[in-house]
Amino acid sequence: MIRLAVPNKGALNEAAQTILKEAGYRPRKDSKELVVVDPDNSCELFFLRPKDIAVYVGEGTLDAGITGRDMLHDSGAQVEEVMPLGFGRSTFRFAANPGEFASVADLKGRRIATSYAGLLESYLAEQGVEARVIKLDGAVETAIRLGVADAVADVVETGTTLRNIGLEVFGEPITRSEAVLIKRAGGAEGQGFRQLVHRLQGVLMARDYVMMDYDIRAERIEEAIALTPGMEGPTVSPLHREGWVAVRAMVPRKGHQQVMDQLWELGARAILVTAIFACRV
C-alpha cells in the first residue's frame, strides 16, 4: 500500500485533491479528515501541512507527496522531484520599498525577512551575498514597515498584496515554483507508486489534449494527417460513402479551433471535438 502526503490547506490543497480525484483516488469527504484510506487503490492519503510534507517523505515515513517546489527546496529534505503537476505556479522574489534596491547584490549586509529561510540562505550563498536572514512564520509583508527587515523574500503570484502595502518587487526571481510530486531520494518505487505516476501523467495529458473526429475525402487524407498526427498516428477508417474516410486523433487543446478551421478548408466535414477525462499514452 502506498502512503501519500497531500497538502491539508492553502493554495495547493484544492487542486491537489482535484487531480487525485481525476486520477481515480478516493476524495476527502470532510476537511477535518487527516487520513483517508482507499483500499480499492491500495493507498493511504495523509493530509499534512504543505511545508512538512517533504520532511515526512524524506525521512521515509511516507512514500510520496505533493508539495510546492519552493517548500521542497526550503526543507533541505532528502527527496527527489518526480514530476511537475501543472498547478500552484508562483515565483519566490525579493521586495522592498520602491527604489531602495535594484538587485540581490544591493542586499549585502542588510536584513531580509522570509518564511523560507533555507531556500533564501542557499540562494544568497550561490550569489556570494552575505546578509542577515530573519525567519518569520507566516506573512512577511509588514516586516519592513515594523522595522524588522530592510527587504523581504516571499512567494509572489500576482504581486498585488505587495503593491497594496507599498512594496515593489526587484531583481531576478529566486526560484519559480509549482506543485510537484516527490519521493524519498533513492527510495524504492513499488507498484502503487508507479501506478500513481502513470495515472497523474494520464490526467495531465487529458487536460492538455482533446479528441478530434472528422470525415474527409480520401485524396486529402495526407494533408489532414499533417494537421492531426495524433500520438502514434491517427485512426483512419473507411466510410460507407465511397471515397471518404473517418479520422480520429488526439489534438492539443490549445489551438484546436484553428486546426478545425484548417481541416474545414481542406474539405473535412462533421468535425467533432470531445474532452478526454483520462488516458494512458
Image (cartoon, rainbow, N blue to C red):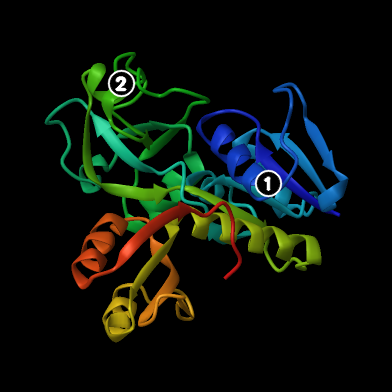
Q: Which of the numbered marks, if any, corresponds to residue 144? A: 2
Residue 214 lies, in percent from the top left, at 38, 66
Foreground pick, 2 / 143: 2
- Residue at (21%, 19%) from the top-left corner? 166
Identify the residue at image location x=23%, y=23%: 163
Residue at disc 1, secondary structure: helix
Q: Nearer the viewer, mark 2 or mark 1?
A: 1
Identify which residue is drawn at 65% across, 58% down. Answer: 199
| Residue 238 located left or right of residue 201 | left
Up/down of 175 relative to 17, above or below = below
What residue sits right under mark 1 in the picture? 55
**In-front residue for pair 34/104:** 34
Q: Amino acid at mark 1?
A: Val
Q: How many marks?
A: 2
Q: Which residue is found at the position 80% from the left and 66% from the top?
A: 191
Name of the residue lying farthest toward the left: 99
In the displayed image of the protein, which residue is found farthest to the front? Answer: 241
Image quarter hosting the N terminus: bottom right
x and y, in percent, of residue 129 in the image: 31, 50
Three-letter code, disc 2 = Ile
